[in-house]
Amino acid sequence: EAAKPAAATAAAEENSEAGEATAAGELSVTAAAATETAADEPSTDEPSKEEATATTTKEPRKKSVAGIPIYCSCRKSQCIKLYCSCFDAGIDCVADCSCKKCKNNPKARIEAQKAEQAAKKERERKMDLIAAAKEEATMLLIVSPGRLGLTLKIDKVLGGATINEIDDACTFKGQLEVGDRIVTIDGIKLTKVSDLQVNKDKIRKFGIAKT
């Protein structure tokens, strides 16, 4: 009978040790599974393969016949003439070039395109003004350099400059009358007083709208 409690105690200890081993095994399996899951998930601290490639990959520079990468150091050609080694090779200049006022790059080409478009619109605007003024002008007067001998006033309604008075010293007074308007000078529509000073030291063509 005394041996029975001892046997029971030993069995209880064996059961306790077995339970602890099972729990430890389960914890080990759980930890291993967690480790595998973490390994499968990409790290947020490191760049992806695509990002790493984008930041580290550099397009190889075109080389000369001698096998040397082509860069330029232009100072006056703005890299848009064959003097520029990059332009001659059909490639854009890059930061490694030491050129000045470069126009052989995408940004400069966009700016040049915008400037050309603006210039085109301005030319079209002037052509429209010229066409409108030519339709109104009924006489073309050749005017020599020097003093006009006219008293003029800008007509804000009809446009051009109205002749209010003609001096006796005016060299073409016989061809004009008070009330006539100068609407163009060398094909450009007259809109302000300062327009009368353009090319005043040269022979000019005045478009006149007769009354």
Image: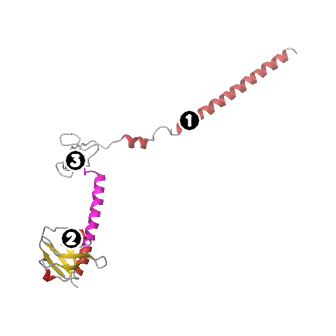
Residue topped by disc 1: 36
The residue drawn where x is 18% and y is 76% is: 150
Toward the bottom, the furthest residue is 211
50 vs 203: above or below: above
Tell me the magenta residue range: 100-127
Regarding mark 1 in the picture, which secondary structure is present there? helix
Tag 3 near tag 1, CB within 8 Å: no
- Mark nearer the viewer, 2 or 1: 2
Q: In the picture, which quadrant includes the N terminus?
A: top right
Of callouts 2 and 1, the N-terminal one: 1
Residue topped by disc 3: 86
Badge 3 amino acid: Cys
Residue topped by disc 2: 196
Q: Is residue 199 covered in magenta?
A: no
Crowd rating for badge 2 (residues with CA inside 10 Å; few <14, some 14–19, many 20+): some
- Mark nearer the viewer, 2 or 3: 2
Badge 1 amino acid: Glu
Quarter residue 135 falls in: bottom left
